[in-house]
Amino acid sequence: MGFWLADRRNGQQASTIQRFDPRFWTANFPRPMMASLVTTAADAMRIDAVFYNSDELAGLIWESEDRLDHPLLRYETNTDYSRLTFRFHWRSSGIMPLNAVNGPTLTIEGTDAAGNEKSWYVRLWNYAAGSPEDADIEMAFSSLDGGFLLPGEADPVHPENIVRLFISIIPPEYDRAGTRYTAPRHGWVEISEISTDGAGAVLEIGDIMVPEHGLSMATAYDDSFNQTPERLLRSIRALGYRGSINHYLGMSHYFRLETLGDGLYVSLSVPQNGEEFAAINQPCATWHRDFLSRATAMGFGVIQSLSYELFNTHCWNDWKQRAQNGDPALTGWDPPSTLLSPAHAGAMAYLQAVARAFVAIARDVGAPIRFQVGEPWWWIMSDGRICLYDAAALVAFGDEAVAIDDINGTKTVQQKAMLDLAGELLAQSTSNLMTAVRDEAGTAGAETLLLAYLPTILDDAAPEARRANLPAGWAWPAFDVLQLEDYDWVIAGNRSATRKGIEAATTRLGYPSGEQHYFAGFVLNETDRHIWRNMAAAITDAQEREAAEIFVWALPQVARDGFVYFAEEESEVQAFDDVEFPLSIGMGATVSTEFSTSIMTGLSGHESRNSEWADARIAFDAGPGIRSDAEIDQLLAFFRARRGAARAFRFRDPGDHSSADMTGVPAATDQLFGTGDGEQTRFALTKSYAQDGTDPQVRYITRPDPDSLIIAVDNVETDKWILRELGQVEFDDPPAAGLRVTAGFLFDVPVRFATDRLDISHATFQAGDVPVVPLLEVKEAP
C-alpha cells in the first residue's frame, strides 16, 4: 500500500480555468425546500428549485477559496476582484423576476477598505439589459454599487477582498411570514454565456492525474447535493478511481413532500406539471440524470444505493420502527433519521417507488442498472433495545411476539424464534424491493447488491442479532453481490475482527469472494486523520482476500483530508524471493554494520552530531564462507536465480539471528514489541539493542523464522495469533489494555547481491584466492 495526505500542491501539475467556471458554483438552501445545480455547457449552468413555504430562499454561490475540492485539484484563492468584469445571460421561470422588489440579488461578502467585514446587496436588475426573465447582465466590480435604487441608494463595493458571491433565488410570492403553499412551487434559473474580462479573469487550478490504482469510490447525495456532478466526477477520475462508483441516494434530500396539518411528509401524490416522479423531487431527478449520464460517458458503472433510513421529521409516524415501549428508532445524526419498518406495507411500497424512479433515470440515460439495498436492518438502540415493536411488525409476529428487553446476551427459544421471524420479514422486504428494481429495469436487466455493516450485525455481545439482521434469506444467490462494511473495526485497527467478521458473513451467506465488495473505513472528523493508515491497511487486506471491488468511503473525506492512494506493484527491482541464502556458505560470512551520522565542527572545535538513520544498515561478504567447488556452483546458481541484484532474499546473520541476545535459544518473553490497548490486533516484531536497558536502538524484524516464533501476552504463551506479512503478528482478539506483548524468534535479514556482477574462478579459488560476494541489507517497512 502507499498513500499520502496532501495539504497543498507543491509542484504538481496545474492548468487554468476562467473565474466563475460553472462547474465550481454551488447551490445551498435551508430545509424543507430542495434545489440542485448542473452544468449545461462549458459556460452555462442551471439551478432547479422546489419551494414549500413563502419565506424559502436558495443561493447560487461562488467561493473565492475552494473549500470542497481535493488540495491537489483546487482552484487558486483570489479575493481581489478589482478591474474584473463579469458577464452572463439570465433566463428564469417560476421564481421572483429580476425587476421585482425582492428580485434576484447578488450578495457580496468581504471587507471594506478599512478591513471591516461587510456585505453589499447588488440588485441584478440594475445591471441587466432585457426582460425580467430573459436578460444580459454585466457587472464591472471596480464600479459596482449595492443598493436598490441607483444612484440615490448607491453603496459602492470594495472589490479588493471579496470572500463570497451569493445570488438569491426565491419564489414569486415570497414573504417573511413563512406561509405554507397549498402546492409546492417549482422554479429554475439558467445562466449561460458566462465570461470574465480583466485582471484575475483566469485562475490556476490543480490538474493532476493519479495513476489508476484499482480502487473504486463511494459518494452520497446528501453530502454532494450542493455541487455539480461534473465537479465530483472530475475529482474521482483525477484521483485514480475507476470502475464503479457506489452512490448512496441518501435519506434527506431525494423525496417529494406533502402537507398534513403543520407537518410535511414524504409523498407519493400525483406529480405536478414539470415533475417526472411521484416519489422523488424534480431537482433531485435532474441532478441524478446529469450525474448518471456523465458517469456512464466516463466509463464508470454507478451503483445506486437505497437504505431503509429516512429523515425523521418527514417520515410518517406509523412507518417507523419502534422499541417495545414505543420509542421510535432514531439514529445519532443531528437532526436524526429514523428506520422504516420492513413489516409496514406502505413504507415498503414507498421504497419500491423511490427505487423505480432512480432505476428509470438510469435506464433512460443508458447507464448500467446496478442497485444496492444499503444496510437494511432492525435498529438496535445504544442501550440494547431492538426495534421490532411497531404496530405492523406486531401484527406480522402475531403470537410469536415476545419481549426482548436487551439484544445482548443469550436468548430464550421463544426470543430466538421471534428474531428468526424478524429476519424472514427483512429478507422478504429486500426481495420485494429487488423485484421492483428488476421489473422497472425491464430488458436492460439489473445487478442487485446488498450492503451489510458487520460490527453491529456480528457484535459478539449480541450473538443472536444476526438472526434478525443477517437472515438466511439473504444467502447467495438472493443478491448478485454481497458488499461488506466494517469501519468501526478499521477505526480501531482491529484487523482480526475484520477477518473473522468477513469469514462469518461468508460462511453464513455463501457468497464467493468474486461476488463480494469491501468498503474500507470512514474518517468522520478531520482530527482523526490517523485512521487513513488503518484504511490503507484494510485495503491491502481486502486485496489479499481478492475482493472483487474495494471502495473508499467517501469522496468528501478524501477531498477534505487530501487522501491520495498509490498502487505499489512489485517490480523487478523491488521483488523478494522468500528463500534462504545457502546456509553453509552464509555461516562463514563477514559482517559490517553501518550508521549514518552527520558531524559539523564549529570554529571552536566543538562538534554537533546528528544521527540520520534510526536503524543500522548491514553489509555482508559471503565469500569467506565458500569451502568447495560444489559451493561455488551452488552460489552461481543462486546468483542467477536472483538475477543478480534484482531480487532480494533471506540471509541468516551468523552473529545476530535470535531474539535471545544474539544467537541464543528464543523464549516467549525475549522481546517486548507492543502493549495492548483493547483495540489493536496487529503488532510489528522488533528487537531492541541497548546497554543497561537505556536508550534502546529498535530494529524491525520483517523476516522472522515462522517455525521459531513464540508469543506471550502478559508473560503467558498463547497460540491465538497469525503471522502476517513483514513480521506483523495479528491476534485473534486484541490484547487487553496495559498487557505486555512479547516474542521469541530466530530471524533472517532481507538482503540482495550488492552488484549485478559476480567474479569467481574455480582455478583461482583452488589456488587460495578468496572470492568477494558482497550482500547488502534491503530495508523493509512493516
Image (spheres, rainbow, N blue to C red):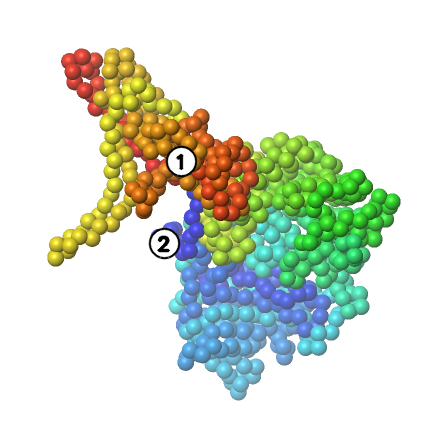
Q: Is residue 38 visible?
A: no
Q: Is residue 485 left or right of residue 144?
A: right
Q: Position of residue 117 (x, y in %)?
A: 47, 77
In this picture, is 148 found above or below 570? below
The residues tagged by marks 1 and 2 sit, at their Cα atoms, a distance apart of 46 Å
Residue placed furthest toward the bottom = 152
Whether 512 is drawn above or below 77: the answer is above
- State which tag comes first along the sequence, 1 or 2: 2
- Residue 284 shows in the view: yes
Q: Residue flagged by tag 2: what amino acid is it?
A: Asn
Which label was assigned to residue 115? Answer: none
The local crowd at label 2, few if under 14, some if 14 to 19, many if 20 or more residues have their Cα within 10 Å, is few
State the image coordinates of residue 538 (x, y, percent, origin top left).
52, 41
Residue topped by disc 1:
670
Can you tell which quarter of the image residue 524 is in? bottom right
Q: Is residue 556 left or right of residue 31?
A: left
SS at badge 2 = loop
Name the residue tied to disc 2: 10
Residue closest to the far right: 399
Q: x and y percent of residue 589 in the render?
A: 25, 25
Q: Quadrant of the C terminus?
A: top left
